Image: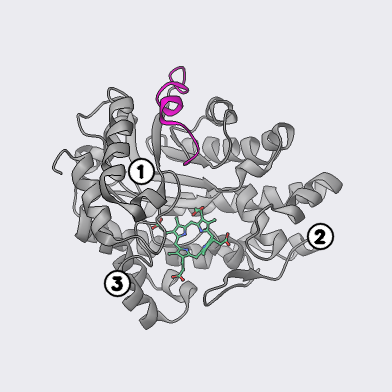
Amino acid sequence: MGEGGGRRKFLEPFRGEVPDVPPIWLMRQAGRYLPEYRALRAEAGDFLTLCYTPKLAAEVTLQPIRRYGFDAAILFSDILVVPDALGQAVRFAEGEGPRLDPIRSTDAVGRLDLARATAKFDIVAETVARLRQDLPAETALIGFCGAPWTVATYMVQGQGSADQVEARLWAYRDPDGFEALIALLVAASIDYLDRQVRAGADCLMVFDTWAGSLPDDEFDRWVVAPTRAIREAVRDLHPDVPIIGFPRGAGATAVWYVSETGVDGIGCDTATPPFVMSEAFDEEDVVVQGNLDPLLLVAGGDRLDERVDEILDLMRGKRFIFNLGHGIVPQTPPENVARLVARVRGQG
Ligand code: 1CP
């Protein structure tokens, strides 16, 4: 943990404290809803160039901190940096989302290379190091990776998909072959997260956006087991650095996910009712984070205030971090974000 870590409000819930006002940050708090992001993105041209240029990636990370003073900054990068670094070229076509040449065999997994990935991981670590210098001392810095299952869904499908069919079928038809891909991603994620912490990240988050597409037995093998392996390895290396898991769509299985993986924080998605969020994890030693609907942040107005108050009331007295239930969407009016932050802090 970086110097000054003791003063970071964001970390208090992980130390067993319950601040009167919960810490707040938002998933995708840097991004297209901010005019200053769009300007910098146009300058960088390609999205991955932005991710691999420490000066620019650090600047994008800082933009929402300057505007809103969030309690945590999240490294600006993407979960698909890992497959790109491993040698499966990733392209971000304008307005289309990511494109990759699909990997569907053990041979193709064998052509990926963790040793060569570290050069690109180090570029990201350089962004983290810059940020730790440039961020206000009271702002925590969150590093992250995609969970092996979610990253694999993009690697196997070759793009984003609604139902992750290709990865799910490969996992059923050839579990040992698919396991080779997951094992490589576990090793790569551990190495990547370790470099981020050594460069100055105070907390880590593992995004499992597509955890909810798996039935329980497959969930255990492809979501829980890899996340536990990452959690254990990173805890051995950095016992004081908390990890937040985000098994989006896990529903009632989220409690099982917490107890089996040992994550220190649980990100609740939009579909989790706040009264469940406030009680379901009472038996677990875990900080709860969530879960305002990102579209309510687009709509704004009284409904936004009412829902924020409802979540705050239900989570009072808990170890809680205010966040959305999924990332900010591009059409979000920046002034609604300011309104949300003020409301959570009792200033609006
Ligand atoms: O055109 C642009 O400017 C790119 C849009 C964009 C941005 C702003 C992408 C492409 N990635 C990001 C940043 C990003 N992605 C962050 C930065 C930190 C932050 O402010 O939160 C993080 C943490 C992510 C993580 C990420 N990328 C996830 C997991 C979280 C989630 O939102 O579910 C996933 C699934 C991705 C893949 C991805 N990257 C980008 C897009 C458009 C997508 C989704 C593709 C799809 O499923 O179709």
Mark 2 or mark 3, earlier in chain: 3
Spot occupied by residue 102 in the image (x, y as percentages of width and height): 73, 66
Rendered image quadrant of residue 38: bottom left
Dot 3 falls on a residue whose secondary structure is helix
Q: How crowded is mark 1: few (under 14 residues within 10 Å), some or many (20 or more)?
A: many
Let me know if residue 293 appears in the view: yes
Would you say the residues marked 2 and 1 are in contact, meaning their CB atoms lie under 8 Å apart?
Answer: no
Quadrant housing the C terminus: top left
Label 1: element kind: strand
Q: Can residue 200 be seen in this view?
A: no
Stretch in magenta: 270-284
What amino acid is found at the position of numbered circle 2 in the picture? Ser
Instruction: Give whichever of discs 1 and 3 has the lower sequence position.
Output: 3
At label 1, the amino acid type is Asn
Q: Residue furthest front?
A: 302
Q: Which is nearer the eye, 303 or 10? A: 303
Asked if disc 2 and disc 3 are in contact, CB closer than 8 Å, the reply is no
Q: Is residue 196 left or right of residue 117?
A: left
Is 275 inside the magenta-drawn segment?
yes
Which residue is the site of mark 3? Answer: 35
At a point 40% along the width and 32% down the height, the residue shown is 288
Q: Position of residue 17 (x, y in %)?
A: 26, 26
Residue 218 lies, with reference to residue 177, above or below; the image says: above
Residue 105, disc? 2
Q: Distance between the residues labelled 2 and 1?
A: 38 Å
Q: Is residue 110 left or right of residue 316?
A: right
- Quarter-of-image position of residue 267: top left
For mark 3, does the 10 Å Cα neighbourhood hold few (<14), some (14 to 19), or many (20 or more) residues?
Answer: few
Query: Mark 1 to mark 3: distance in Å?
Result: 22 Å
Magenta-colored stretch includes residue 211: no
203 or 33, nearer to the observer: 33
Q: Residue at x 28, y 37 (%)?
A: 306
